[in-house]
Image (spheres, grey):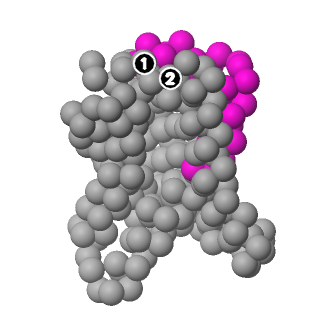
Amino acid sequence: MERRAAIILACIALAEASWSVAEMVVASPRALVRYLGFTGGASPLGWMLALAVAAVWIALAARLPSVRHNLLEPSWLKLLALVVAVAAGICEEAVFRKLLMDALAARGHGIALQLAASASAFGVAHAVWGLFRGSLGVALSVTVATGTLGFLLAVVYVASGRNLSPCVVSHFAINLFVEPGLVLAALRGEMRR
């Protein structure tokens, strides 16, 4: 089971890190850091919400036995989870918050549609967790759960003055603590409970 989890984590890390590397090649590391908002400007409210979302989401995920067991457990899988946390925090927040929401805003769509689109796209993209066990029911519940997380991170993005850095840090913290437990939970069928 751990070997399969390692392969899944490595594939996620590779796919999502590829986007960040491509962005650095096209622009520059400095431009990527600026794009992500790490040069300043996020509101204190955005940072407080980002930390609250991470804390609540980690606590909720810890209800799964595999997540709870691996929450603070050092392991080689946790090392892979660190890479996933960096890659997903950057790539997914850039795509599901900044690119998607800013594109909708540029076309004149309101905040409600931006939040809904970000949440829906994020949820659908994470349905794969339920499909690891071949369960459409679990895929649907995972879509709803991660869609909720996507909505909360979209709210953080707006509350941060459309600065992405609080979202990236929140997403990083969530992935750092819940991976690899989340992958193991999906493989073991714990998500159907």
- Under tag 1, what secondary structure? helix
Secondary structure that dominates the magenta span: helix
Q: Residue at x 58, y 51 (%)?
A: 89
> Mark 1 and 2 residues: CB-CB less than 8 Å, in contact?
yes
From the top left corner, tell me how far across and down residue 165 is, in percent: 59, 58
Q: Where on the picture, by quarter, is residue 84?
A: top right
Whether residue 25 is in magenta: the answer is no
Horizontally, residue 186 falls left or right of residue 168, namely: left
The answer to whether residue 119 is seen in the rendering is no
Q: Where on the picture, by quarter, is residue 80?
A: top right
- Under tag 2, what secondary structure? helix
Q: Amino acid at mark 2?
A: Leu
Magenta residues, as a range? 64-88
Q: Residue at x 27, y 32 (%)?
A: 135
From the top left corner, tell me how far across and down residue 60 is, in percent: 38, 26
Q: Amino acid at mark 1?
A: Arg
The image shows residue 50, relative to residue 27, as above or below, that is above
Q: Which residue corresponds to mark 1?
A: 188
